[in-house]
């Protein structure tokens, strides 16, 4: 048996449970002072405070620091070719995100670069990003396709995700997002692309077990609520769990769709209306909010306090992508959770651990430090939770442990 004993923990902070926490429960976390944690064969065997057990184990001295569960980044567009730094000048001239997309730039310019890249090139690039994420304390991440927009290149992206899952420590949850934009070759024939998505791409992704989730960009000029419903229903018929990019720029009914299709999560929700909040509360959908994207787009911030009051479990993620959020720093997202969403540090911790795990159907296995869960954790250069939400711009992750092994 492989044992790792982490002793001399100044403060262990973790949400508890096997499912998303909502309402007041989102801010209730367990705090253990002068604590220890024992991992056995990659899982948490026991957590306690006071004298650590004396047994045969590799010992890691936490030097009185804060320990939390490993962070979970529940929304990334990890697989893409190129970058889009040229869009910065357009942005500064006042050209909007949707205008850039309508002119064939934005997502579509990344589609060209992604199609041109080999599987190896995409894999090397994503592996570098994953290493950076791991150094920031992220031990599990969701990864979407969505820059291929044809069968061959969407499958290429999903195969890269599958391969990376076994080649490096960050566990990946794959999402098929062929409905990220209408590819230019179908500009005059959107019905045909919808058919391709529903009748060819989704069934093939499912046959090859390349994704767990299906996501749609429900937005003005991208996919309507009705089209999004069709695509998500087609995904469900093949066993793919629905997720939806909703209310990022315009509220066109995406968040209301969560109840109808039973979405596990809704993403962005920057301009989510009260009806959307009510629908998510009823459906038990996790609101996956992406404050670094609001920051980067110069947009407003999602009404997270209203969501928490209405009993919607809130997760936060990076949205790492080459356009609306070229950052994978989940610690910055935590800062923004406090400063812009007015969440407490305790609510923030739940949002980037247990609730994020629930958004990718893994709350029974990760997202908290309790006996039986995976031993994924971060030792922080910080004495308490307030400190990591308050400091900004530095990487405070000191040591990262994945499945009971020190990986950073
Ligand atoms: O979540 N909104 C759609 N997709 C991404 C942006 C993708 C891009 O600009 O490349 C997002 O913001
Ligand atoms: Fe996104």
Image (cartoon, helix red, strand yellow):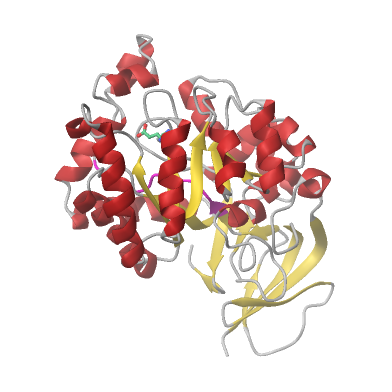
Q: Nearer the viewer, residue 3 or 322?
A: 322
> Where is 135 relative to 374, above or below?
above
Ligand 1 lies in quarter = top left
Task: Give coordinates of residue 222: x percent, y percent.
Answer: 37, 29
Q: Residue at x 29, y 20 (%)?
A: 102
Give the magenta-colored segment's residue range: 72-81
Residue 80 visible, this orientation: no
> Where is 309 relative to 241, above or below?
above
> Where is 59 relative to 194, above or below?
below
Q: Nearer the viewer, residue 321 or 329?
A: 321
Q: Residue at x 74, y 57 (%)?
A: 15
| Residue 307 on the magenta span | no
The overriding secondary structure of the stretch rendered in magenta is loop
Residue 6 in the figure: left or right of residue 258: right
Residue 395 in the figure: left or right of residue 63: left
Residue 329 visible, this orientation: yes
Task: Give coordinates of residue 96: x percent, y percent.
Answer: 39, 16
Q: Nearer the viewer, residue 132 or 306?
A: 306
Identify the image quadrant of the N terminus.
bottom right
> Where is 109 relative to 408, above or below?
above
Q: Quadrant of residue 253?
A: top right
């Amino acid at each position: 048996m492989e044992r790792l004993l982490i002793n001399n923990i100044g403060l262990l902070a973790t949400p508890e449970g096997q499912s998303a926490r909502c309402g007041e429960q989102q801010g209730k976390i367990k705090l253990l002072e002068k604590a220890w944690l024992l991992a056995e064969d990659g899982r948490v065997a026991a957590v306690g405070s006071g004298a650590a057990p004396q047994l045969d184990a590799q010992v890691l001295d936490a030097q009185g620091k804060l320990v939390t569960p490993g962070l979970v980044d529940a929304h990334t567009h990890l697989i893409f070719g190129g970058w889009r730094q040229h869009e910065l000048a357009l942005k500064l001239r006042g050209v909007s995100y949707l205008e850039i997309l309508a002119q064939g730039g934005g997502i579509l310019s990344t589609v060209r670069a992604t199609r041109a890249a080999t599987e190896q090139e995409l894999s090397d690039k994503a592996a570098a990003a994953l290493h950076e994420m791991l150094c920031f304390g992220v031990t599990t991440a969701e990864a979407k396709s969505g820059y291929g927009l044809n069968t061959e290149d969407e499958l290429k992206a999903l195969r890269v995700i599958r391969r990376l899952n076994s080649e490096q420590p960050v566990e990946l949850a794959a999402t098929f997002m062929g409905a990220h934009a209408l590819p230019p070759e179908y500009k005059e024939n959107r019905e045909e692309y919808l058919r391709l998505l529903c009748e060819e791409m989704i069934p093939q992704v499912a046959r090859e077990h390349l994704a767990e989730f299906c996501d749609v960009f429900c937005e003005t000029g991208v996919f309507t609520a009705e089209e999004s419903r069709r695509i998500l229903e087609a995904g469900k018929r093949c066993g793919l769990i629905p997720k939806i990019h909703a209310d990022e720029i315009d509220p066109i009914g995406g968040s209301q769709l969560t109840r109808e299709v039973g979405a596990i999560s809704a993403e962005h929700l920057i301009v989510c209306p009260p009806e959307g909040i009510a629908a998510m509360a009823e459906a038990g959908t996790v609101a996956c909010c992406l404050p670094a994207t609001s920051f980067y787009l110069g947009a407003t911030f999602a009404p997270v306090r209203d969501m928490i009051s209405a009993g919607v479990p809130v997760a936060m993620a990076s949205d790492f992508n080459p356009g609306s959020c070229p950052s994978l720093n989940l610690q910055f997202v935590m800062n923004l959770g406090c400063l812009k969403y007015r969440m407490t540090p305790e609510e923030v911790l739940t949002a980037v651990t247990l609730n994020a795990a629930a958004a990718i159907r893994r709350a029974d296995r990760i997202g908290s430090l309790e006996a039986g869960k995976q031993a994924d954790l971060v030792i922080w250069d910080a004495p308490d939770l307030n400190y990591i939400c308050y400091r900004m711009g530095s990487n405070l992750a000191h040591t990262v442990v994945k499945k009971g092994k020190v990986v950073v």
